[in-house]
Image (cartoon, helix red, strand yellow):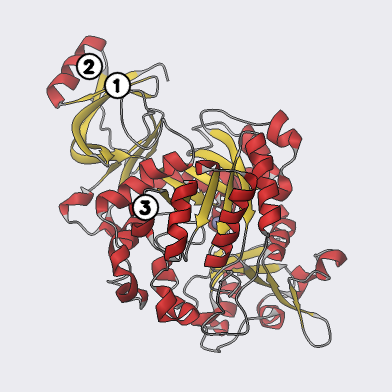
Amino acid sequence: MEKTFAVLGRIYSSFMPMRLNDGLVVRDGKVLYLGDADSVMKISRELGAEIINYGKKTIIPGFIDSHMHLNSLGMSLMTLDLRGTKSIDELKLKLRKFIEGRDKKIVIGRGWDQELFSEGRWPNAMDLDEAIKDAPVILVRVCGHAAVMNSAAISLLPEEELKGPYIQKDERGRPTGLVFEDAVGRALSILGEALDKREMLRKGSEQAARLGVTSVGFMSAKRADLFALKDMKELEELKTRVFLYMDHAEISDSIALDLKYGTEMVKLNGIKLFADGSFGARTALLSEPYSDDPSTRGTAVMKEDELAYWMKYAIDRGLQTATHAIGDAALDSVLKAMEISKVKGLAGRIEHASLVRPDQVDKMRTIGVGVSVQPRFVISDWWLVKRLGKERARYAYPFKTLINAGLVVGFSTDAPVEPLDPWLSVNAAVGRGEEERVEIFELTKHERLSLAEALHAYTAGSAELLGANDLGKLEIGKRADFVVVNADPFSGTDLKTIRVLETYIEGTRVYSATTENLIF
Ligand SMILES: [Zn+2]
């Protein structure tokens, strides 16, 4: 990367404040100079630097997806996509088609949602057995907190696992095939061993580069992920920067201290914790019962003391925590745990913060928390008003409120829960489901963001959450991670249709949509 080159184009070097430039000079992977076309050309001539002229094309800082699952994303690219399946019958059909003529050691599927099924019920092992009997099958629900397995897959789970509380049983005590919460991840990691980890991560990172995502916060990473990433050839095999947040069960002092790992491309950043589950499975922890099931207000996964223990553990080892908190009562637990452990500011990230009561905003500001939010949830969770009731739903996904409170807000997709394509999330943050006619739009339209706010959150906001101050903007001295796109997002173009033409990391082109030679 001992290379100096210049780029000309319509360059948004920062969104807040909004800064436009005609050109930038890159040296050794960092921004050396920004300015108008004349000065950039003059400097390039003097330095003998090559100039890449993108003409009227738009260049923006690389997107930073602050919360996603690189392993599951890679796995999803190797597995069956069940999003939008309308019935259990259709699900069976898709399964049969997927294995047709192929020798599958295992079938992993993802994305079903029983809310969409015409049968009006959850799928079970018997349904799956009717489609595939010989190979193990596991199909993860769209939220990632529930899965259904066939009999062959259930038979591969250890005896101990089957006794666990998250394995659903029928009245005779036999597993129905449905598993929930922690059991989903464990079943996937047992069954997923048949898949190649390195290939999985490579595929995930290639997808990121293709979509202009130059850095990711990789949540709930396992040791095997860390080891595989360390072995990968950076920029060749690994095409996005990876900030790891390890599953708390996978962390130990030998990982946190001895092995605390960091290169330009892969860095161990923190520990992932869980305070609750999801709205979809009614396991997100609410302070009042669910409106469509008054018998429950959700499930606490980790309580305050346990959260506080890990927060203290992390900060003592120079790591962040990133705590999953969807319901408002889960958010209470996280804020309480931060008080107990005396962890302040960005050391204790909050993931999702999907339901925030007005009285919690002040507290969040006082502690100075950073929040990673997923704008696409506004559209995907179209049934949310049913779960929460109209009154409470007004406080769901309060992006504008959090930004106005001065909190650091980073964007993310939770991919593969939502598609990794950043423009879909930007569109959701700006439109808030008006176009998609989701019920929550009317109740929460005051939470719409401006395009500049959304793009800022997806670049500089996410960078701040990750503690990566040299990313997120194209400023002198910062890393030259940028994306060339086919349309100016501020020109009124349909955001969902914007395409990435080229992706650069550290001044190296890691993706190009064409083979056309743009260099002269
Ligand atoms: Zn997640």
- The answer to whether marks 2 and 3 mark residues whose Cβ atoms lie closer than 8 Å is no
Residue 119: quadrant of the picture: bottom right
Residue position for label 1: 5
Q: Amino acid at mark 2?
A: Ser
Between the residue at mark 2 and the residue at mark 3, the CA separation in whole angstroms equals 43 Å
Determine crowd level at label 3: few under 14, some 14-19, many 20+ residues with C-alpha closer than 10 A.
Answer: some
Q: Earlier in the sequence, mark 1 or mark 2?
A: 1
Looking at the image, can residue 153 be seen?
yes
Which circle marks residue 44 in the picture?
Answer: 2
Between the residue at mark 3 and the residue at mark 1, the CA separation in whole angstroms equals 40 Å
Given the current orientation, which residue lies at the most extreme right position?
A: 159
Residue at 41% of width from left, 30% of height from top?
470
- The answer to whether marks 1 and 2 mark residues whose Cβ atoms lie closer than 8 Å is yes
Of residues 440 and 212, the one drawn nearer to the viewer in this rendering: 440
Please identify the quadrant where the N terminus is shown.
Answer: top left
Name the spot of residue 215 as percent of width and height, x first. Answer: 46, 40
Which circle marks residue 405 in the picture?
Answer: 3
Please identify the quadrant where the C terminus is shown.
Answer: top left
285 vs 313, left or right, is left
Residue 254: quadrant of the picture: top right
Determine crowd level at label 2: few under 14, some 14-19, many 20+ residues with C-alpha closer than 10 A.
Answer: many
